[in-house]
Amino acid sequence: MTQQTNQSWGGRFTEPTDEFVAAFTASIGFDQRLYHHDIRGSIAHATMLARVGVLTEQERDAIVNGLQEIEADIERGEIEWSVALEDVHMNIEARLTDKIGITGKKLHTGRSRNDQIATDIRLYLRDEIDIVAEEITRLRKGMIELAAQEADTIMPGFTHLQTAQPVTFGHHLLAWQEMIARDHERLLDCRKRVNIMPLGAAALAGTTYPIDRHVTAELLGFERPAENSLDAVSDRDFAIEFTAFASILLMHLSRMSEELVLWTSAQFDFIDLPDRFCTGSSIMPQKKNPDVPELVRGKTGRVYGHLMGLLTLMKSQPLAYNKDNQEDKEPLFDTLDTVKGCLRAFADMVPALRAKADNMREAASRGFATATDLADYLVRRGVAFRDAHEIVGKSVAYGIAQGKDLAEMSLDELKQFSTMIDDDVFEVLTLEGSVAARNHIGGTAPDQVSAAAQRARDALSSLNAVNPSAQGA
Ligand code: ARG
């Protein structure tokens, strides 16, 4: 990057900016990422200015061609960003003037960097949201298909991480899918508020030129122009909202990661995570570490940090634009990079998970997972639930002492605790009987899981059908 005197606002200054201050206040180091959206916004602005007669058609053409050339220059790596020119907007404008002469200086008519940057971030974030939505779609599909495949694979269900009742692995995966489905909806809802156009607000109060904000909004695919110029240039709640979405999504991915880490341990040994998602240890030759889920769990913290950072950035700002807002970009960009990386890892990894069905089943058959089923059986035979709970509690205590699960006891052993128990009890004490009995919407019965997987497929396609921006539907 080169140092030069700022030509964009230097008029009232009597000495050049201190070199440290120039570097300290510059954003070009990170906002260059916005170049494509900045150029897109400028082309729309110039087109609108020509439409309302503020620029001639020749001026517009010179500007539009110049900007397109600059974009190509940037993509060929031919631009040297200048710190003295502060940010992406002034770097591009200065280059435009170098290229096309005095007409380049007309581009900024009726506009300020304040509405320009607010527009750029919204355009950029809108495109990124569409990429994130595609990855979420891919992840949801992977979860749904694996769930359908594992609809009758039995595993222990946990509360307090203690064996509670048998469930199916498909049911567990569809629980994950529900979490991500809500995140998906939150994302698409956030997109609606991102897709509002600040351009035309100018510095803060609007502009004296006869601009037509509907034209610019339409050219840029925005839903509408922002209602209030002061609000349009100042608030970054849309970026905060995206980061809040991202925090909740990563909270979910982190919970799933925790389960994957547990399940790949020798103690659980419920799943196999293919080698390509794992790494080894430089000292312990036997190790195969679940690094990908561990890292996703770890990366969650930085996104929470960005949410707190952005909230704090905004909280004390008076209207309208303040330079504080320049600090919105790095947390937002890092949130985007992190979310895209974690989603990609998960969307690749989930379809590759292999259930170790025998181990899952074995674990479910320990820990008295069908104790509730025995209590429900007694209730069906007229015993009050509290009494049934007590009877089963005593059978479990007996089982612990004898080292036997309920299904492993003889009828006579069971009858010691209640004469109401008959030989049909074994139907409910089996793992298959237990899951099959929970046969209602939202329950873990294999038939319900298959039906739920189909509903999830349908819900995903209709969500993507009403959101034309979403790909991969
Ligand atoms: N780099 C600035 C930002 O990121 C652009 C807007 C600057 N506006 C100003 N009046 N200094 O927010």
Image (tube, rainbow, N blue to C red):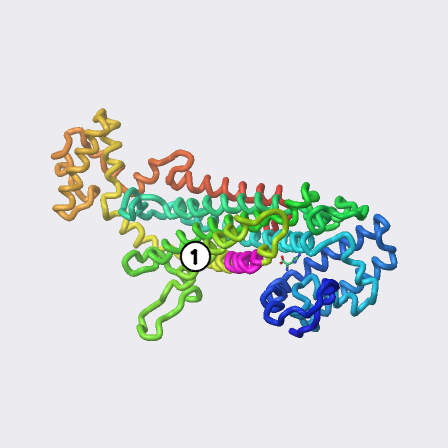
Q: Residue furthest top?
A: 382
Q: Residue furthest front?
A: 14
Q: Identify which residue is drawn at 27% across, 47% down.
A: 162
Residue visible at 40% across and 47% down in the picture: 170
Where residue 17 appears, x then y in whole percent? Answer: 65, 68
The verdict on label 1 being within 8 Å of ligand 1 is: no
Q: Is residue 336 magenta?
A: yes
> Is residue 28 visible in the rendered structure shown here?
yes
- Left/right of residue 439 with respect to residue 240 in the rendered view: left
Q: Is residue 288 left or right of residue 92?
A: left
Q: Is residue 330 above or below residue 468?
A: below
Which sits in the foreground, 13 or 423? 13
Q: Residues within 10 Å of mark 1 (few under 14, many from 20)?
A: some
Q: Where in the figure is residue 252, as x and y percent of width and height?
A: 43, 50
- Which secondary structure class fits the magenta region best? helix
Left or right of residue 112: residue 304:
left
Residue under the point 83% across and 57% down: 60
Which of these two is toward me, 375 or 307?
307
Q: Is residue 340 visible?
A: no
Percent position (x, y) of residue 247?
47, 51
Residue drawn at x 23%, y 48% is 366
Q: Does the magenta run of residues contain 265?
A: no
Task: Give the secondary structure at mark 1.
Answer: helix
The quadrant of the image that shows the N terminus is bottom right
Q: Up-down: is 82 above or below 312?
A: below
Q: Which residue is mark 1?
A: 301
Q: Which residues are magenta?
A: 327-340
